[in-house]
Amino acid sequence: MTKEKFSFRLSGTDGAARLGQITTPHGTAQTPIFMPVATQATVKGLTFDEVRNAGAETVLSNAYHLYLRPGVDRIRDAGGLHRFMGWAGPVLTDSGGYQAFSLGALRRINDNGILFRSHIDGSEHLFTPEVAIRNQQLFGADIIMCFDQCVFSAGDRSDVRAAMDRTHRWARVCYDTHAPTAYSGVQALFGIVQGGTIPEFRDESTELVTSIPFDGYAIGGLAVGETKEEMHRITRQVCEGLPSDKPRYLMGVGSPEDLVNGVALGVDMFDCVLPTRVARNGALFTPTGRINIANRRYGDQDVPLDETCDCYACQHYSAAYLRHLFKAGEMLGPRMASVHNLRFVLRLMEQMRDAIAGGRFVEFRDRFLGAYQPTDEQSRQTQKHRWIRERGV
């Protein structure tokens, strides 16, 4: 039986916001879409039934982490990543390029590739563009990413330039490695635009990367230290230079306000660990902003945390009970918080798709952003810069 080829169909627009559908060998996904992150073949603490019931159509896994454990051969011999982890829908794999940024002292970079030292056992592993592509091919993902170098977006201009140039060279190698194989056409390959927050670099990168006929295009190197204003400016700039008939993917972005603003700027695809990561620490999304369920005020609230939410947690438990679970150290607390946050962002994507289809997106955006109070920008910047310093990047 012939596998369905990858395709993207743009079905409507409302301003810059876009409505579409991605078709893959493992089914379809409606865009704009948020992809929960299953870094090591699992969305932490949740079953894939729970992920699917929250509204997910596509998940993301990380090729670098899966290469280290359980290994490419183990996953291939199990029948590929879908069968190995029990997820029937589309899967996107990140190549490992982000780890060039996040692992700091555990990697060395040159024009050939990235030499990683495993955080598990200290062993050394060389990732080249060819290796990154072949690993993802053997995993059997539906969408795979070029190997790129991500850097601190507000870093030294010469560092941003060097990383961008390297990303461009690797993009061509990735395409040439993938194109002549049986995977091409069935398994989509996305190119990645880099260039930090420097406008002329972003224009140059957009022009060069889109000159290669990738199946889709990603905006990399954001949400890594820049301000929200800079993120929006660069996203708008790059989207304006991307082809309208290919999907656009803003990598590593997942706070509710960023999802709404990203869709408004023309983005189709998002992923981020944020919804489940903050959930495990008791931070839950509500229509008016993120709350800390451990706060005393929730101790006597015998009603759902969010009465507008249809997730399992809000349909079955009170805010007081969720607080109790966290205070008692019960594992059900982080699990239910993760279910809630995933459903919140996935329902948000559903609402945006409906608004675009009905020509009401601007009204929806203004209403949502008028009610939702984002995390304090100064606190967010302080936390991000501390994270960057700790990793030596």
Image (cartoon, helix red, strand yellow):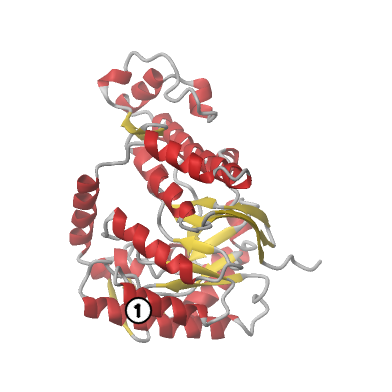
Quadrant including the N terminus: bottom right
| Element at label 1 | helix
The amino acid sitting under disc 1 is Met
Q: Nearer the viewer, residue 298 or 114?
A: 298
Q: List the single residue furthest toward the right.
A: 1
- Which residue in the structure is indicated by mark 1? 164
Residue 38 in view (yes/no): no
Category of crowding for the residue at label 1, using alpha-carbon neighbours closer than 10 angstroms: few (below 14), some (14–19), many (at least 20): many
Q: Give the vertical position of 254 relative to 53 (above or below).
A: below
Q: How many marks?
A: 1
Image-based side of 343 in relation to 98, left or right: right
Q: Give the vertical position of 19 relative to 320 (above or below).
A: below
**Residue 332, position as x, y percentages in the image:** 43, 30
**Residue at position x 40%, y 30% from top?**
333
Residue 225 in view (yes/no): yes
**Residue at position x 44%, y 45% from top?**
44
Q: Nearer the viewer, residue 218 or 5?
A: 218
Quadrant including the C terminus: bottom left
**Residue 152, position as x, y percentages in the image:** 26, 67
**Residue 244, position as x, y percentages in the image:** 57, 67
Q: Give the vertical position of 284 relative to 242 (above or below).
A: above
Image-based side of 335 in relation to 200, left or right: right
**Residue 88, position as x, y percentages in the image:** 65, 52
Image-based side of 190 in relation to 327, left or right: right
Q: Nearer the viewer, residue 17 or 185?
A: 17
Q: Nearer the viewer, residue 73 or 306?
A: 306
Quadrant housing residue 202: bottom left
